[in-house]
């Protein structure tokens, strides 16, 4: 890894991505950290959140900052207060959803890095006229070790 890195709010704002109804602002990506981790703010509208899934290659932690959030962990949904830290090790099926009436803001980190690349590729698919082909989203997920649970 190179030396210390500073990513200003203006630079992070240029790395804003939208997919799955969520918006993320990438503060640190693999290119910044030598692949060690990625860190981003996620903004999730009311009622939204990713489907249940697991990461094969990375661990993930969440720090809710504003709004209300429920997490699916160990097969059970539970509301988590702002300021809590939630850690999900690789291989664990999980999800979160905004259970409030205002946008949910969370700081999220994955280790090692790579989630930001997955999300950027999905954002390209979601930006296509008519929206994404879900089979392609599942394929991109598989290429990045992210697997969506069967409904």
Image (cartoon, rainbow, N blue to C red):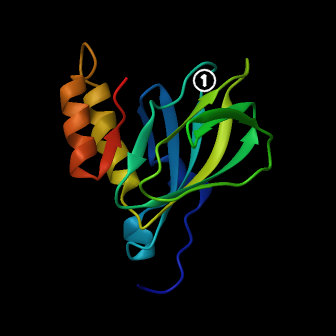
Q: Residues within 10 Å of mark 1 (few under 14, many from 20)?
A: many
Most distant residue in the front direction: 75
Residue 42: x and y in percent read 57, 41
Quarter occupied by the N terminus:
bottom left
Residue 130: x and y in percent read 25, 13
Element on which disc 1 rests: loop
Residue 90: x and y in percent read 44, 58
Q: Is residue 81 above or below residue 30?
A: above
Task: Tell me which residue sits at (52%, 76%) in the image.
Answer: 5
Q: Nearer the viewer, residue 87 or 35?
A: 87
> Splitting the image into 4 quarters, where does residue 4 fall?
bottom right
Residue that mark 1 sits on = 45
Q: Is residue 63 left or right of residue 14?
A: right
Residue 96: x and y in percent read 58, 35
Q: Is residue 28 left or right of residue 64?
A: left
Most distant residue in the top direction: 130
């Amino acid at each position: 890894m190179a030396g210390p890195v500073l990513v200003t709010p203006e630079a992070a704002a240029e790395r804003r991505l939208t997919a799955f109804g969520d918006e993320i602002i990438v503060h640190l990506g693999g290119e910044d950290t030598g692949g060690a981790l990625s860190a981003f703010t996620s903004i999730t509208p009311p009622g939204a959140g990713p489907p249940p899934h697991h990461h094969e290659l990375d661990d993930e932690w969440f720090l809710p900052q504003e709004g209300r959030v429920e997490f699916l962990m160990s097969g059970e949904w539970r509301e988590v207060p702002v300021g809590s830290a939630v850690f999900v090790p690789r291989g664990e099926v999980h999800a979160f959803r905004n259970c409030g009436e205002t946008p949910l803001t969370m700081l999220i980190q994955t280790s090692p890095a790579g989630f930001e690349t997955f999300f950027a590729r999905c954002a390209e698919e979601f930006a296509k006229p008519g929206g994404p082909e879900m089979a392609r989203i599942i394929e991109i997920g598989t290429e990045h070790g992210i697997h969506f649970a069967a409904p």
